Structures are given as structure tokens and as C-alpha cells.
Amino acid sequence: MPEIGATVATVVWSSGDFFGCQFAKPIPKAALSAALLRNPFAPAAHPDSTQLISDQTEVEDFQDDRAPYAVRLRVILGSAILLWALILWAAGVI
């Protein structure tokens, strides 16, 4: 960055050619203004095909370890019923 030099940041979102970064340290407003003035928007370069292939294999290797939807729904409903029973018991209704 123009005013402060190289800065550590993590990309937290992306949408097309736009990327949002979270900086490790706060960025002064003057440094941000200087960066915007010196670097007008230019579309980001697309990654090469080898990078896309390696990213795709990582996605294919991903295994979803969550319980099936029906099991999660039963746990949520059972917890809600139990919570309401405890509320009614504490209120002296039951």
C-alpha cells in the first residue's frame, strides 16, 4: 500500500472481480485514500488452469461429516419441546 508499504491481509470474500480483505493491523484512512487514488480498479487476473484443477480436487476430497437432515431436524424439534417443557415446569404450569 502506498503510505504504509506491504501489509498482511486475509481475503474474506470474493464476488467476481471484487475481493474483500481483513487486514492484520488497522489501516489509517490516509493510507486507504492514497491506495484508492493510485490504484484505480482493474479486473483481477484469472488464475491459471492448474490452480483451478488443484482447487477442484480439494473440493472433491471434502467429506460432509454432518448428520443427515432428518436427524438434525429431530434433534432441533426434540430440544425445543424439552425446553418448553422445562419452562412450563419452572412456571408451575405442569
Image: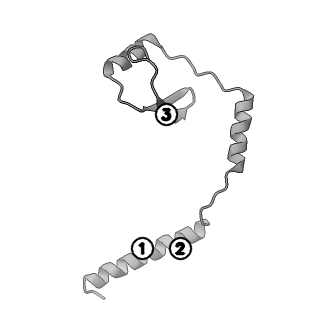
Horizontal side, residue 56 vs residue 18: left or right: right
Residue denoted by label 3: 10
Residue denoted by label 1: 80
Horizontal side, residue 41 vs residue 53: left or right: left
Horizontal side, residue 73 vs residue 61: left or right: left
Residue 9 position (above or below residue 41): below
* x, y percent for residue 64: 64, 57
Residue 44 position (above or below residue 15): above
Residue type at mark 2? Arg
In terms of image quadrants, where is residue 32? top left
**The N terminus appears in which quarter of the rendering?**
top left
For the residues labelled 3 and 2, the Cα–Cα distance comes to 38 Å
Residue denoted by label 2: 74
In terms of image quadrants, where is residue 52? top right
Q: Residue at x 52, y 27 (%)?
A: 18
Q: Residue at x 47, y 30 (%)?
A: 9
Q: Local crowd at mark 2 within 10 Å, few (<14), some, or many (≥20)? A: few
Nearer the observer: mark 3 or 2; the answer is 3
Q: Residue at x 55, y 68 (%)?
A: 72
Disc on the earlier residue, 1 or 2: 2
Question: Coloured how?
Answer: one colour
Residue 85 position (above or below residue 2): below
Looking at the rendered structure, the secondary structure element under dot 2 is helix
Disc on the earlier residue, 1 or 3: 3
For the residues labelled 1 and 3, the Cα–Cα distance comes to 38 Å
Q: Local crowd at mark 3 within 10 Å, few (<14), some, or many (≥20)? A: few
